[in-house]
Image (cartoon, coloured by chain):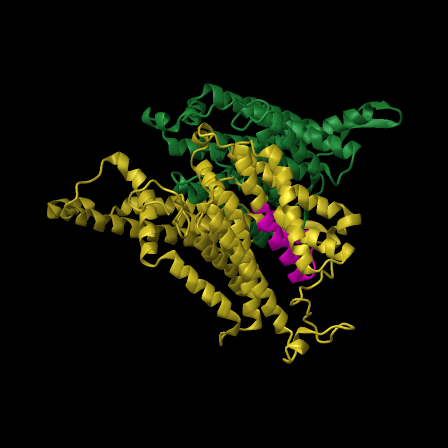
Chain colours: A green, B yellow
């Protein structure tokens, strides 16, 4: 029981990270129907910006941890969002009215580019960061196993909840969110009604990148080791999460992220660590076979 | 009229400079964190160095680049707007403007290739490929490079059946390549099969994998299929990496047997009771002979693939693939079973990938999961899409470009993958429909071209 609870907490933490990345995939897919392959790299860039901000803060002499974390959060979101915007502007916007696979290839190219860009600029070695947020508490103790919850895990879950709440509010109640939903439903009609479609799409990329940046920050703090290649697997898993939840559905992305995190945590907890990624993909395949629209996706009726 | 309007069309310097300044601002935001600082390890702890000079250089470069681009574009527009009134054609309605470039591109491609017909280009290409090892400028390195190119051409043609003809987006094609390579290597190692015995087995096993994977997932819509195949590619790689008793894990399989020339090995010394290729034909032994032979093997395999694909395109099954790609609902209405048709394309594609994999194993003599990462799948898909989906000739062109690009980029050493990624984006933006845009169905209603 205690072991189960521990894995549950670990899984939820991991799932929050995947969920935040998955939102970027699902938003972009919902609007322009493309798999933004470079999104995993955006998350990786977020992790690096977080690391660099932390080191710069150390040099400047900011030692009050909450302030440092706040600055890291804001700087990471801001700078990474700039990358998200630029990627869309350079690699996807010129291909807006092209055929379906063109932006995908362009995205794969962008992904390769960004990986090597970071590798060249920051080195290929794994970057290890000392833990910044210390401590935690013991939730319960039974048969010699104690369930530890760190403040960092609480912080990650709380921040994810807060971001999700804020994000849902933005999507459901602001003009910006209305434009997003309108473009998702019918881009041509939205354009006819005076919505700047290009700007809306850019906004989707910026929001997605900012959320992925937060995920990158969390990973940097939580695991403390990052390298230029972390974006690939996390990106695939987050996309899996988005598909699992029903691509295009925002709550679905979050749910899918949590599920993937949980599957991964429980699989490595009870079975083998080596095959945890295999387990994730197998479950994805099973879900898609029996519920092809994902868990929360709307069934799509194809019309001629 | 032109004279009156000209002053209004003077270059809008304010706008251009503003645009360039905005781009420079964005570049500053991009460059500041990642270029401006570099994490360095000092005494096992992370430290940081600043490189603000690089940031300044980047920002300046972006400013100037954007300025030049904007200038070129506005000069171009300027000239166009001056010349437009002289052309007698009425301007098209605004709606048609967007549709047109796509159509026109296909047309131009089509017309150009009707002048130099694909048959002629193909024949010339084959003649060149066959003669390559004996051309005066040829070298061992060149033949080796050409072998790599032809492997990718073959993989591209194989994937072309799946993506180009049947319209199924497969992001895990490397899985079949890996299955082919490993099944040949294992068969050879465990059961002592030679290359020529192992090759068909490898193809069959890969096709079986394609069937097994395709059966449950081919009912899925396009993008779900993409992610499932991507996942499958990763699963295969992870299994190869972790199933140590069979695959030998990350260490890979060494000593994969080399192919022989109808039983005559390419060795310096004949095995007991046998003759080598060199002895049999009374030519001096030369290690290059094997390289050339391998080149011809893969060339023959690739040409066979091409011939089969071209034939298949004319068979009912090929027509069904193309029809399914164009309109799935119409196909259902006409009584085509989409799952079966897709499954056939998927497994034929897998089989071709398996052949290529077996060849890869025998050529390298050593395989490990390292060779079958997602980047391979991405490269093969890029070859198909950059070439222009469904175009056999385009695949060749794209394979030459994509394989030689990193190869010639060796001068730039660590920059070559960076350039590779950037080139992929640039080619896509420059020619979204591929280098050779020709994707018309093989069968058309009789008309301009008639049935082909």
Q: Looking at the rendering, which quadrant does residue B184 occupy?
A: bottom right
* Magenta stretch prevailing secondary structure: helix
Can residue B369 be seen in this snapshot?
yes
**B352 within the magenta span:** yes
Q: Residue at x 55, y 52 (%)?
A: B155
Q: Is residue A48 above or below residue A155?
A: below
**The magenta stretch spans which residues?**
B349-376
x then y, percent, for residue B297: 59, 63
Can residue A58 be seen in this snapshot?
no
x then y, percent, for residue B275: 71, 74
Question: Extreme top residue here?
Answer: A173
x then y, percent, for residue B340: 55, 35
Decide which of A255, B241 is in the foreground and name it.
B241
Q: Residue at x 68, y 57 (%)?
A: B197
**B81 within the magenta span:** no
Decide which of B206, B53 is in the foreground and name it.
B206
Q: Is residue B352 above or below residue B220?
A: below
Taking B411 as reference, is B440 left or right? Answer: left
Look at the image and tell me in which quarter the N terminus of chain A lies.
top right
Look at the image and tell me in which quarter the C terminus of chain A lies.
top left
Q: Residue at x 73, y 30 (%)?
A: A10
Q: Is residue B72 above or below residue A240?
A: below
Q: Looking at the rendering, which quadrant does residue A156 occupy?
A: top right
x then y, percent, for residue A83: 50, 42
Question: Extreme right residue here?
Answer: A143
């Amino acid at each position: 029981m205690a072991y189960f609870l521990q894995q549950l907490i670990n899984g939820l933490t991991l799932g929050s990270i995947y969920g935040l990345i998955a939102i970027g995939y699902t938003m972009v897919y919902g609007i322009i129907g493309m798999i933004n392959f470079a999104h995993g790299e955006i998350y990786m860039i977020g992790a690096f910006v977080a690391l660099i901000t932390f080191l710069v803060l150390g040099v400047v002499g900011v030692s009050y941890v909450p302030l440092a974390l706040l600055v890291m959060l804001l700087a990471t979101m801001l700078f990474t969002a700039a990358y998200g915007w630029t990627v869309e502007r350079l690699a996807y916007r010129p291909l807006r009215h092209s055929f379906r696979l063109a932006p995908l290839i362009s995205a794969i190219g962008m992904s390769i580019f960004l990986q090597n860009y970071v590798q060249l600029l920051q080195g290929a070695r794994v970057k290890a960061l000392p833990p910044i947020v210390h401590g935690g508490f013991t939730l319960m103790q039974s048969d010699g196993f104690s369930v530890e919850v760190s403040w960092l895990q609480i912080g990650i879950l709380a921040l994810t909840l807060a971001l999700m709440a804020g994000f849902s509010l933005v999507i459901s109640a602001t003009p910006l969110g209305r434009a997003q939903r309108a473009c998702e439903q019918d881009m041509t009609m939205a354009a006819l009604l005076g919505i700047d479609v290009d700007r809306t799409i850019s906004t989707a990329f910026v929001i997605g990148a900012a959320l992925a940046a937060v995920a990158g920050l969390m990973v940097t703090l939580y695991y403390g080791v990052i390298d230029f290649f972390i974006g690939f697997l996390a990106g695939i898993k987050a996309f899996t999460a988005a598909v699992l939840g029903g691509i295009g559905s925002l709550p679905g992305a979050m749910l899918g992220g949590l599920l993937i995190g949980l599957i991964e945590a429980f699989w490595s907890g009870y079975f083998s660590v080596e095959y945890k990624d295999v387990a994730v993909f197998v479950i994805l395949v099973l879900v898609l076979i029996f519920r092809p629209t994902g868990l929360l996706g709307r069934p799509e009726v194809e019309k001629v | 009229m032109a004279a009156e309007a000209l002053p209004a069309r003077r270059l809008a310097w304010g706008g251009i400079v503003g645009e360039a300044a905005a781009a420079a601002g964005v570049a500053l935001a991009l460059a500041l964190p990642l270029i401006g600082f570099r994490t360095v390890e000092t005494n096992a702890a992370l430290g940081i160095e600043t490189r603000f000079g690089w940031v300044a250089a980047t920002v300046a470069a972006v400013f100037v680049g954007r300025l030049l681009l904007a200038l070129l574009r506005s000069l171009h527009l300027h000239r166009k707007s001056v010349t437009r009134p002289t052309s007698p054609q009425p301007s098209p309605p605004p709606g048609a403007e967007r549709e047109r470039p796509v159509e026109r591109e296909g047309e131009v491609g089509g017309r150009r290739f009707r002048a130099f017909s694909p048959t002629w280009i193909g024949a010339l290409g084959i003649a060149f490929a066959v003669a390559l090892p004996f051309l005066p400028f040829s070298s061992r390195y060149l033949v080796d490079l050409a072998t790599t190119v032809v492997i990718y051409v073959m993989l591209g043609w194989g994937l072309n059946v799946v993506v180009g003809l049947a319209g199924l987006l497969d992001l895990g094609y490397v899985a079949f390549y890996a299955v082919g390579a490993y099944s040949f290597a294992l068969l050879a190692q465990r059961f002592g099969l030679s290359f020529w015995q192992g090759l068909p087995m490898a193809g069959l096993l890969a096709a079986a994998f394609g069937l097994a994977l395709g059966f449950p997932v081919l009912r899925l819509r396009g993008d779900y299929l993409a992610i499932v195949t991507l996942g499958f590619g990763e699963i295969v790689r992870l299994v190869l990496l972790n199933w140590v008793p069979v695959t030998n894990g990350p260490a890979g399989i060494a000593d994969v047997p080399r192919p022989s020339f109808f039983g005559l090995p390419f060795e310096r010394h004949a095995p007991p009771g046998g003759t080598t290729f060199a002895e049999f034909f009374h030519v001096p032994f030369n290690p290059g002979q094997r390289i050339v032979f391998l080149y011809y093997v893969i060339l023959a395999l690739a040409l066979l693939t091409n011939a089969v694909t071209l034939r298949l395109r004319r068979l009912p099954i090929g027509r069904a693939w193309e029809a399914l790609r164009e309109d799935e609902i119409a196909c259902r209405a006409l009584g085509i079973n989409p799952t079966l048709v897709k499954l056939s394309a998927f497994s034929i594609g897998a089989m071709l990938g398996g052949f290529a994999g077996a060849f890869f194993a025998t050529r390298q003599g050593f395989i490990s999961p390292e060779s079958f990462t997602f980047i391979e799948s991405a490269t093969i898909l890029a070859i198909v899409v950059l070439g222009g989906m469904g175009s056999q000739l385009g695949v060749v062109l794209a394979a030459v470009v994509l394989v030689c690009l990193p190869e010639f980029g060796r001068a730039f050493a660590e920059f070559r993958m960076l350039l590779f990624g950037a080139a992929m984006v640039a080619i896509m933006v420059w020619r979204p429909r591929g280098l050779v845009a020709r994707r018309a169905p093989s069968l058309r209603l009789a008309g301009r071209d008639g049935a082909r």
